[in-house]
Structures are given as C-alpha cells and as structure tokens.
Image (cartoon, rainbow, N blue to C red):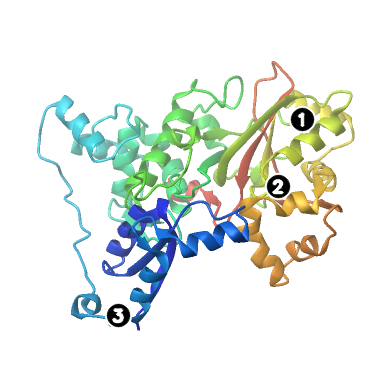
Amino acid sequence: MPTIAVHTHVFARLVKSVTHVSGMPTARQAFVPQPIVGRTPAELRAYIEGIDPVHKRPFIQVMMEGLTNPLNAEDLKGMTFDRSTPRLLEPDTEENLQQLFMNNNWTDFLPVVLPTEERVAQMLKGTSHAPDEIVGRLRPTVYREWWEFTVEKVAVNAVMAGARPEYLPVILAQAASGMTARSSSTTSFATVSIVNGPIRNELKMNSGIGAMGPYNHANATIGRAFCLLSQNLQGGSVPNETYMGSQGNAYSYSATYAENEEQSPWEPFHVQKGHQSGESVVTTFLGGWYTHSGYGPRQYWEETFARALTAVDVFSEPILILDPLSAREFVARGFDNKQKLSEWFARHARMTAKEYWDNQSVQTIFRPRAVSGIEPWATRLKAAPDELIEIFRPEDISIVVIGGGTQAGWKMVSGMLRENSIVSIDKWR
C-alpha cells in the first residue's frame, strides 16, 4: 500500500540513513520546515500550503504523489546489505592509522591507543568472560536497529580509550546496560555513570577532590571507553546521520564518577536501590543535559534549592550531587537519610501548570501519557493554568555524595534512571 512519512527538513539525511539500514531505500518521504513546536496554526498551515524544502516542490503535490502513485518493482524488492566488518586493519604507520580512525569516525577526535591484537589480548585478561561472548546490544535511537557486540569488541574500545585491564569489568557492565552514551536525541543527551562498591578502591577511582574533573586515570578512561564503544558498537554517531544533538554535549567525552561512600553520612546509592554494600555496581543515567551548581545548604537554603529545582528542565529528572560537607549540613537539618531529602525536594519543586506544559519535551513526550490517563501526568494536565503543581516525584530525584570536603558545594545534573540502569560489575569480572 502506498504510504508516505512526514518529517521536518533537518532530518533529511537521517531519514535517508535510517531507511537504508532498514532495507527500505525507496520509502516515500515528505518534508516541512523546522521547527513545528511553538508555531501558530497559521504558520503551520503555511508549511502545508508551501514548498517542501527538500524536494523543492509543493508539499501537497509531494504528498499526493506519494499516496497515489503505485508501488513499482524497486519499491517492493527491498534491500539487504552485509553488516559484517573485518576484524583486522592492514598494517600502517601510527600517523596514518590515527588519521584512518578519525576519517571513519571511530574516535572522539582525540588521539587513541591503537588496538593491536597484543593490546586487546592483554585487555581481555581483565575478565573471565570469553572474547566471543555477547555483551549486549546498542542503538542511537529507538527507530534504529540494534547492533549486537562481543566482549572482544568492548575490549578494543577500552584499549583505544587508554583503559587498563582491571577496568574492563566496569566498562563491560556499562555496555551491558543497553544504554548508549551516544544518544541521537536532538536534546543533546549524554550519560552519567556512578560507580559504587569495593571496586572503587580496588581501581583507585577518585571520589574526593576533583572527582568530576580530569584528575584520575580510572575515572577518565572508563568514562571515555564507554563513550567510544557507544558510538562504535551501535552503528555510528555521525552528525546529521546517526547523531542529531543540536548543540552536542561535553559529557560525551567522559562522565563516570565514584560515590564517596566513606565520607557520606548516608547509605550508598546502590544500597538505597536494593544492593548489598559489598557488591560493586555501576548506575548509568540518561541525561547530562544540564548542570546547576551552588553552595549550601545555607541560611536561605529552602528558597535556593526550590528555585534551582524549578530552573532545571522538567523533562529530565535531576541527580543531586553533594559534597560531603553539604550532605552533613542536610543531616544537621534533620535529613538523616536520602529518602527524606528526595521527598522534600519533590514537595518544593513546583511551578505553574501552564509553565510546565509549555516545555517542548513535556508536550511531545508527556502530554500523550497524560491524555491516556497515566499518572502523575494526567493529574498535572487537569490542573488550572496558574495552579502550582509538583514537577517531580521523590523517586525521580537521585542523590549521590561526591567531593573532597573543601567546599560545601553541590551540583544538579540531568540524569534519568531507566530499566537496566543499574548493572552488576562483579558479574563481569
């Protein structure tokens, strides 16, 4: 049956790539200008009555031809192609190989450690799992096909990132989450990973002074390895083809941190989520979209944190990252566990319903849920425009303790928990 899909024009190359890998290279497409969110009915009507910016013909004409022209033999046969890749490259000089990796978008455009067979074999000593064992599957977005990958392929990317063999179980656990660190979302999402348990100290990860900066080999290379494997083991992360993040994200270089369990006045994050303190796990959050920073809690902390919570993007729940000094200040104010603090934040993170529903991502993702009667969005949709509504649930707000105690600082970092977000590292030893 003749069918035509409608897209905005900035996705033209992406549409071509997706239909190609899906075996539908002749799928019919029509395009309108970007953006469509926030435009008046008259402006949207003008798109329909105007010119398709990709085909350079009237939009309605493109639509009618797509819906009425019969399918031909080329349309019906579809297409397949070889998805396999060679295991080895031809030998060459260091300089030429570095350039080859960049030309093929296999790097983050920083120099990599070339993954020779010897180096990969050494990296594989960091796990008891077989090189050909399937670790998981990744894809940049929900409409792309899944790419399956092995332990050896993860090890290749770990070598490229400069990681050490003992780091490999953490990297394998991140890869097994099924969450990509190279999401193609136009919102420029990245990922943030938090490591808990004994492995933090075994690897000498930094959870204290400078823990979120470039001051520790394990932190930096584990995070980089996860980012590199995400782009290379999901079929790519190429702007305008398999990556559409409008502004990009610095967290896409490396964003793996260890919680400072020893200096925290509360139970570690993984224990809060049902794991044993002696387990080593990594939690990978989808987010990294925004970062707020501040100090305290101080005298007017309630106003400060309420204001900060309503300033974040309501579509992406926050991770509250507290220096140990900040965490202890909260304990002194009666918050003797993280749950109480999350509940306080949820009660005081409020904005008017009209402001909440004016958010683009809330409109496109949450409004359909609200219309379908799914809570808490259905209740938020029923609120009067000027009514104050709570924008997060307690379980939406994650709290971890990271820092070295030189300043009672805190950060709010975008980070949404998803299914399979928390993965055992011990399983991959």
**Residue under circle 1?**
327
**Residue 99: x percent and y percent?**
20, 30
Q: Quadrant of the N terminus?
A: bottom left
**Residue 326: x percent and y percent?**
76, 26
Q: Residue at x 62, y 33 (%)?
A: 291
The mark found on residue 69 in the picture is 3
Looking at marks 3 and 1 on the same chain, the residue that comes earlier in the sequence is marked by 3
The mark found on residue 272 in the picture is 2
Looking at marks 2 and 3 on the same chain, the residue that comes earlier in the sequence is marked by 3
User: For the residue marked with disc 1, what is the amino acid?
Assistant: Ala
User: For the residue marked with disc 3, what is the amino acid?
Assistant: Asn
Per the image, label 3 sits on a secondary structure element best described as loop
**Residue 115: x percent and y percent?**
24, 36
Per the image, label 1 sits on a secondary structure element best described as helix
The mark found on residue 315 in the picture is none
Q: Quadrant of the C terminus?
A: top left
User: For the residue marked with disc 2, what is the amino acid?
Assistant: Gln
Q: Residue at x 47, y 42 (%)?
A: 246
**Are there few (<14), some (14-19), or many (20+) residues within 10 Å of tag 2?**
some
- Which of these two is toward me, 368 or 306? 368
Whole-angstrom CA distance, mark 2 to mark 3, is 59 Å
Is residue 145 visible in the rendered image? The answer is: no
Q: Residue at x 10, y 35 (%)?
A: 91
Dots 2, 3 in contact, CB < 8 A: no
Whole-angstrom CA distance, mark 1 to mark 2, is 15 Å
